[in-house]
Image (tube, rainbow, N blue to C red):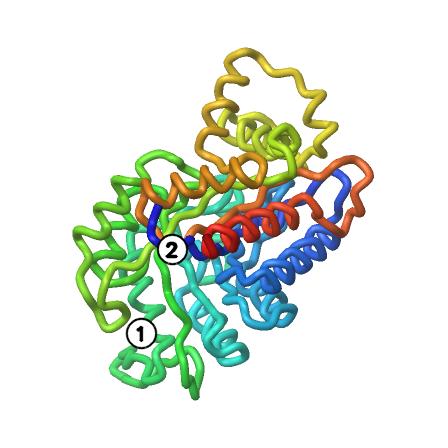
Amino acid sequence: MTSAAPALSVLDLVPVRTDQTTTDAVSAGLALAQVADDLGYRRYWVAEHHNMPAVAATNPPVLMAMLAAATRRIRVGSGGVMLPNHAPLVVAEQVALLEAAFPGRIDLGIGRAPGTDPVTSYALRHGAGGVSDEAVQHFPQYVQDVLAMMAPEGVQVSVAGRTQPLRATPGATSVADVWLLGSSDYSARLAAQLGLPYVFAHHFSGQGTLEALELYRSSFRPSAHLDAPRTFLTVNAVVAESSVEARRRALPNQLMMLALRTGQPLGPQLLVEEAEKVELSPQQGEVLERMAQRWIVGDPAGAGEQLERLVATYEVDEVMVHPVAGAHVGTEPGTAPAREETLRLLADWVSTAARG
């Protein structure tokens, strides 16, 4: 392990359980962010996914505004905004306004995946947002456009022989930190080329993590944004007082991931007792077992050891935890106590390790 205990951050998809409405899920997410804020977590990022029955995080900037207003000091960001779905100016304006309202607390994590199915992707990119199917091809330029427009001086734009300045906001005094996100070597290579910090989506992929991080570090070019490589990774985590209970709480999210990867119908996230009634084939059981090996699942000591190995293997000084602990039948719908406990127990372990 590195000489110091890692800093911890949080990734939230704002999951929707079978016992929840969207209102309940958002309430639980706001409460979770406040717990993370109180525990000293460094960042709280929300994802962008569309038209998914188990995910309420459809609009990161809207969620970021709510989260920043509900917390005191934690950095709030996107993990991430899927830039090909949006006009770059709109993203720059939204994030610049958030930075103006909460200076020094806003992160813009940018990805290039659609974050949804093909039909919903078509609806996103053929509406009035000024984007198209070709947006993915222009991703590197769009990233640079967002960076330039958020800068206080903005950019000079020429249209029909007329040149004028274009700024995301008229009087910026600070700029949000911009990160590139990815689950392959594409974004690692681009982040290194542009001199931007980089995050690997280990919680989603779990494959090629080391190769992508090494590519980023070895190819990094210093820039006005960053003078040395800066990176961390995300990981799914479930921590409970016992390892048996942790494995029970991990099952609902594992079943959702299994359905997603095997093309099964998706629905709201099951409660623990509902998940335990699902019958799995031996092959499906093996998939879940392999999946769990890439997660942090266990009691505080076991989870801490897994975190320690993760940090040592990938040489990161920050880990973004995606707390995926399921809820039991009878849980108050607007709460997520098992997710909150994951954050508390993991933070307690890191604090103890730092003192030791």
Residue labelled with disc 2: 4
- Is 232 on the left or on the right of 81, as rendered? left
Write the residue at 70% across / 48% down. 336
Q: Residue furthest top?
A: 282
Write the residue at 70% across / 53% down. 28
- Is 184 on the left or on the right of 339, as rendered? left
Looking at the rendered structure, which numbered label has been put on residue 148?
1
Above or below: residue 355 compared with residue 171: above
Dot 1 amino acid type = Ala
Q: Classify mark 2: helix, strand or loop.
A: loop
The alpha-carbon separation of the residues under discs 2 and 1 comes to 36 Å
The residue lying toward the viewer, choosing from 329 and 26, is 329
- Is 272 on the left or on the right of 219, as rendered? right
Dot 2 amino acid type = Ala
Above or below: residue 325 compared with residue 143: above
Q: Classify mark 1: helix, strand or loop.
A: helix
Examine the image and state in which quarter residue 220 appears.
bottom left
Above or below: residue 228 compared with residue 188: below
The residue lying toward the viewer, choosing from 307 and 91, is 307
Residue 222 locus on image (x, y percent): 19, 66
> Between disc 2 and disc 1, whose residue precedes?
2
Residue 42 locus on image (x, y percent): 49, 62
Above or below: residue 216 compared with residue 77: above
Q: Is residue 79 visible?
A: no
